[in-house]
Image (spheres, grey):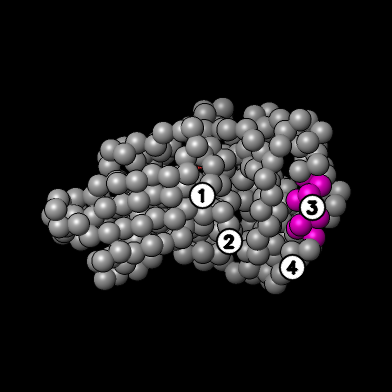
Amino acid sequence: REVRVFAPATVANVAVGFDILGFAINRPGDEIVARLNPAFSGVRITAITGTGDKVLPLDTEKNTAGVSAQRLLHHLGQPETGVELEIHKKMPFGSGLGSSAASAAGAAVAVNELLGAPLTREALLYFTVLGEEVADGSFHADNVAPCLVGGITLIRSNDSLDVHHLPVPNGLHVAVVHPEIEILTRDARAVLSDQVPLSVAIRQTGSLASFITALYTNDISLLGRSLHDHMIEPQRKQLITGFDDVKAAALQRGALGCSISGAGPSIFALCDSGYLAQAVGQGMQAAFQQHGVESQLYVSPI
Ligand code: HSE
């Protein structure tokens, strides 16, 4: 028996919700194959493709997909069941697109399906976060939650994994531009100060609260006014060559807002139509090119 799943890329933080907001996009995404194999017990990774010149660990306990699948098997009381995992990477590492989260989520979903789907997608969250933690050393669900359940998700608490689905205004699309720069989440977290000035906290909580209000009231204008990151973007943007010009290009072409996708270097811009998102994305790519940086554009409904 074999199960094959697609695990989509995700945009975490969404400017206003560091570690607590994220949404899924329709491509790129990883493909995970899980297969029962009675010849051994536990999870074995039998193939990893699409990693280019990078080497991902085949050791189950060092691999995000392996850890997620293994913890799930144990939780289900089936540590003796033998499962082969194939990981087909279809998105770059260190891209800010939730690559490690996608592999961890895909593995949990595939193994759950293989065993007759005893758990809901929501219940798979815990094992998936444990898997992603292996890659970036921190326990946060802002990539894995939208990857598992789709749409925009809010994480009230990363400790108790209290996750909520948020409504999406009509026609909302995103342009995500991935420049050929690699930033590891670990490194992008290391540049952050652990202190937030009160004035910044006030602006950021105002932005977050009004962004959520805009989603619930379908208020595109308020959404645009809310989409500002006062807290994290100023500390991380210097890691991304050309960031200010790329953002300016997006806003000039009519994006509602623009910021860093996850830990970067990808940059996302929300737009009120797919047509606009395409034009905005091309403008962002041209701005990167001015800095000698090639990039890949993904346009997706949310
Ligand atoms: N919220 C995380 C961060 C997402 O920005 O560091 C990347 O894993």
Residue 280 badge: 3
Foreground disc of the pair 1, 2? 1
Asked which secondary structure carries label 2, the reply is strand
Choose top left, top right, bottom left or bottom right for residue 5: bottom left
Q: Residues within 10 Å of mark 4 (few under 14, many from 20)?
A: some
Foreground disc of the pair 1, 3? 1
Q: How many marks?
A: 4
Q: Residues within 10 Å of mark 2 (few under 14, many from 20)?
A: some
From the viewer's side, name the closer residue of 291 and 168: 291
Asked which secondary structure carries label 3, the reply is helix
Q: CA distance from mark 4 to mark 1?
A: 35 Å
Q: Tell me where residue 227 appears, x and y as whole percent.
A: 71, 52
Compared with 298, 95 (above or below) is above
Residue 219 badge: 4
4 or 3: tag closer to the N-terminus: 4
In the shown orientation, is residue 106 left or right of residue 44? Answer: right
Residue identified by numbered label 2: 26
Q: Look at the image and say whether residue 187 sits in the magenta stretch.
A: no
Choose top left, top right, bottom left or bottom right for residue 181: top right
Question: Which amino acid, mark 2?
Answer: Asn
Choose top left, top right, bottom left or bottom right for residue 132: top left
Asked which secondary structure carries label 1, the reply is loop
1 or 3: tag closer to the N-terminus: 1
Residue identified by numbered label 1: 90
3 or 2: tag closer to the N-terminus: 2
Magenta stretch bounds:
276-284
Q: Residues within 10 Å of mark 1 (few under 14, many from 20)?
A: some
Q: Tell me where residue 69 appears, x and y as whole percent.
A: 29, 52
Foreground disc of the pair 4, 1? 1
Foreground disc of the pair 4, 3? 3
Rendered-image quadrant of the C terminus: bottom right
